[in-house]
Image (cartoon, helix red, strand yellow):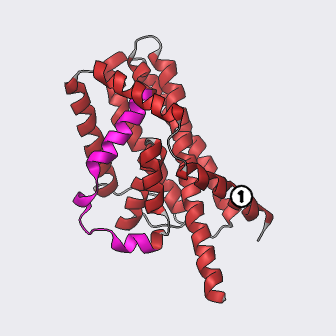
Amino acid sequence: MPAYEQKMMRELKLWQRKMMRRPGYFDRLSKRLQDKMNSWIPDKVHKAITVTIKQMIRGVLFGARWTTGSKETRSLEETDRAVEEKIKFYQKTAAVEGAATGAGGILLGLADFPLLIAIKIKLLFEIASLYGHSVDDYKERVFLLHIFELAFSSAKHRRNVFLSMQNWKLTSKNLPDDIQQFDWRNFQQEYRDYIDLAKMAQLVPVIGAPVGAVVNYRLIRKLGHTAIQSYHMRWAETQDATNNFRH
């Protein structure tokens, strides 16, 4: 195995152990803080955000057809490099969007949620394409949903999602044909709770613009890194299957 792939496998194993880690003290503390913050926000705002998240993601993933580049024949190292460039581009895009909406206070700050979701989904489509997976495939879009969950969920939920993503070739065969059977309620609740904690300061006048830029930049980085490791895991599973076949 080339040196780059050996290094990648070491990083992948560390990441996999992290995904399997059970909630620690700070995870539980963050959850309590989130619950406290949620109690301060009017219920109608919660409902508006919940509906926005659900409809946006369903619409973007299963309604629209994104234009993505065709897969070129590259080594894993070259592909990773191309993916990193995409992530950097979308980080800058999200930072500009976060600063613009953050500068507008509460009304424009709320508009950031659907805009940022669209940026995140577009990034995932681009990354999937670079790794050679067709986003026209419904099951590949479900995998993108799982990457989304993995990046933006509590430690407890993250562990369960990670387990469902292992051996995806086999797991995907048992997916329901109807996307309505996907657990949308849990999905949007986990995402909303995770994002609320990071994004509420963006709604505050004056500090909203810099907070929006920095938070969006970091959230895109986190999503991109999660996607890289997720596709590395699938690559590693393919290598194992190939080696087992040869033996």
Q: Is residue 47 left or right of residue 245?
A: left
Q: Is residue 206 left or right of residue 65?
A: right
Q: Secondary structure at mark 1?
A: helix
Screen quadrant of the N terminus: bottom right
In depth, the one of 181 and 56 nearer the eye is 181
237, above or below 200, in the image: below
Quarter of the image for residue 42 reads top left
Residue 72 visible in the picture: no
Q: Is residue 230 magenta?
A: no
Amino acid marked by disc 1: Arg
Image spot of residue 192 (x, y percent): 35, 36
Q: Which residue, as the protein is rendered here, is positioned at the far right? A: 3
Residue 36 visible in the picture: yes
State the count of labels. Answer: 1
Screen quadrant of the C terminus: bottom right
Residue at 25% in and 45% down? 55
Q: Is residue 191 magenta?
A: yes
Q: Which residue, as the protein is rendered here, is positioned at the far left? A: 44
66, above or below 154, in the image: below
Image spot of residue 229 (x, y percent): 58, 55
Q: Is residue 43 left or right of residue 174?
A: left
Residue at 63% in and 49% down? 84
Name the main secondary structure of what is drawn in magenta.
helix
In the image, the segment drawn in magenta is 170-197
Quarter of the image for residue 152 reads top left
Image spot of residue 194 (x, y percent): 42, 35
**Label 1 environment density (alpha carbons within 10 Å; few <14, some 14–19, many ≥20):** few
Image spot of residue 153 (x, y percent): 43, 43
Q: Is residue 185 left or right of residue 135?
A: left
> Which residue is under mark 1?
10
